Amino acid sequence: MYKRKVLIIDDELPALQVLITMLAKRADLEIVLATTAYQQAYDYLDEHDVDLLLVDLDLRVNTGYNLMAAVEPPTQMIVCTASGEKGSESLHHGAIDFVEKLVDEDRLNFAVDRALRQLELLEHEQANRVYPSTIAVQLDTSDAFVNVRVNELVYASAEGKTTCLFFGDGQELLAKKLLGNLQLLLDPAEFIRIQKKYIVRRDAISQYLPGMLTHLKTKNWWVELRPEAIAGLAEEEEKRRLPVGERYRHRVEKALGIR
């Protein structure tokens, strides 16, 4: 039987052990990490994909919401909390369900079953999805819609509730569309998320620049775009050299075949 990979984090060891005991009974799950340490969970999620994340919201040194932000679909998230009100709020942050402490085993299994069904649906949809060659976007300056050719898009940048699209001929377009909603329409084999703010066409990247760039006085990682991919923007460094977010770094390196 194929086992789904699960990461569990709760800063209270007795609560963690309860979750381990309950989930270890399931033949369809593999607990790849169970920890009370926020940083250990964060580092694991930075380098590995999991199918299911069980997370406590109050981790003392940090919040469970930051760990929830470290995973992307189709990973499913179940929140464990002492407060039903906080649990309900977590649904607005991407959790599929929540369970209250002390955790009832039947209720936990119900939440896990629900999460696995949703995971299967998303995987099936992704496997059979045909991505559009053109996308209709509404201009930020008017109610008009324009059709954007995906093969001409080099990268997109979040600007609040709008997204700025950058094209190979140097043109820019500000659209009334959230970056996350745009990402759902783009083939992940062609576009990669390098930061919360940026999505970039994979073949537009010329090089990956790890570590500190002294002249920029930063310790970020970067991708540099091919000059021919961004004609008209090549002289503007902030538009041809884009920062890679820390929690996206390992995913970007995998996508570029570096690791």
Image: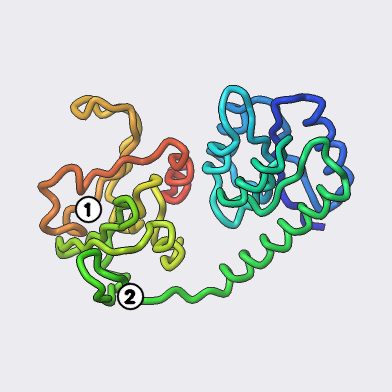
Q: Position of residue 194 (x, y in %)?
A: 39, 47
Circle 1: is it few (<14), some (14-19), or many (20+) Cα within 10 Å?
A: some
The residue depicted at 82 percent of the width and 30 percent of the height is 17
Q: Is residue 158 left or right of residue 26?
A: left
Q: Nearer the viewer, mark 1 or mark 2?
A: 2
Task: Give the answer, above or below, for where 48 lies relative to 147.
Answer: above
Residue farthest front in this picture: 85
Label 1 amino acid?
Arg
Q: Is residue 241 left or right of residue 236?
A: right
Q: Position of residue 190 (x, y in %)?
A: 40, 62
The residue depicted at 25 percent of the width and 29 percent of the height is 213
Circle 2: is it few (<14), some (14-19), or many (20+) Cα within 10 Å?
A: few
Q: Which residue carries the number 2 mark?
A: 136
Q: Is residue 197 left or right of residue 104?
A: left
Q: Position of residue 208 (x, y in %)?
A: 32, 42
Mark 1: secondary structure: loop
The residue depicted at 74 percent of the width and 25 percent of the height is 12
The residue depicted at 77 percent of the width and 45 percent of the height is 30
Q: Position of residue 206 (x, y in %)?
A: 27, 50
* Residue 1: quarter of image: bottom right
Residue 226 is marked as 1
Q: Of 3 and 165, which appears nearest the observer? A: 165
